[in-house]
Amino acid sequence: MDLDKDRLAKLLSMTGSDHDAEALAAIRKANDLLRAHRKSWPDVLGLSKPPIEPPPAQPSTSWQVDRRQPPPQQRPGYQRLRDYRDDLRQQPFLPRLLGFPFWLFVELLALILPRKQLNTRGRFIAIVFALGMLLGIGAWIWLGYYLLL
């Protein structure tokens, strides 16, 4: 069976449609038609050589961002400061207010270094949390005594 070039021409003319779905469906149907007749685009177009492959992508310099690469994986127990701050904001308001020095510390760090990785299971954050909570509770107790006396 010979390739129906009129049908192929009609399908290719439909690829100029303003509707993206229609154009995509037309090119897919054209590729299906070629596949069914075991032909390739160079065969149909009468090209003796296969089309030239595009040159390989140049390696990006340090100031360019390669959008094809996925973001680096986070190590277990580590979290970006911005994400840690967002998680802290999801906690109930009263415990955050009780430990306001720790809350303030996390907010400031996330503002200054939003992409810095923080070891959320480490000794540093545990000590800062404990000191912030103790300082916050102490400040509230002092404020209560000050207001009562």
Image (cartoon, rainbow, N blue to C red):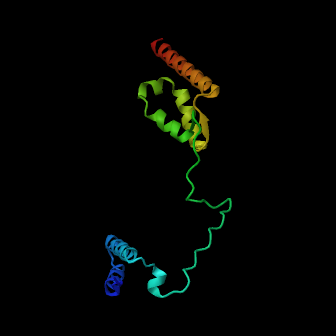
Query: Where is residue 27 shown, x and y percent of the image?
Result: 37, 75
Name the quadrant of the N terminus: bottom left
Question: Which residue shows up at 33% across the image and 77% down it?
Answer: 18
Q: Nearer the viewer, residue 72 or 117?
A: 72
Q: Residue at image x 47%, y 83%? A: 43
Q: Quadrant of residue 118?
A: top right
- Please determine whether, in this image, residue 63 is positioned above or below residue 133: below
Using the image, determine if residue 76 lies above or below residue 131: below
Horizontal and vertical percent for residue 110? 56, 40
Residue reaching furthest to the right: 62
- Is 10 rendered above or below residue 103? below
The image position of residue 52, as x and y in percent, is 57, 79
Residue 17, compared with residue 79, is above or below; it is below
- In-image side of 95 versus 122 (left or right): left
- The residue shown at (33%, 80%) is 11
- x, y percent for residue 64: 63, 61
Q: Residue at x 36, y 81 (%)?
A: 12
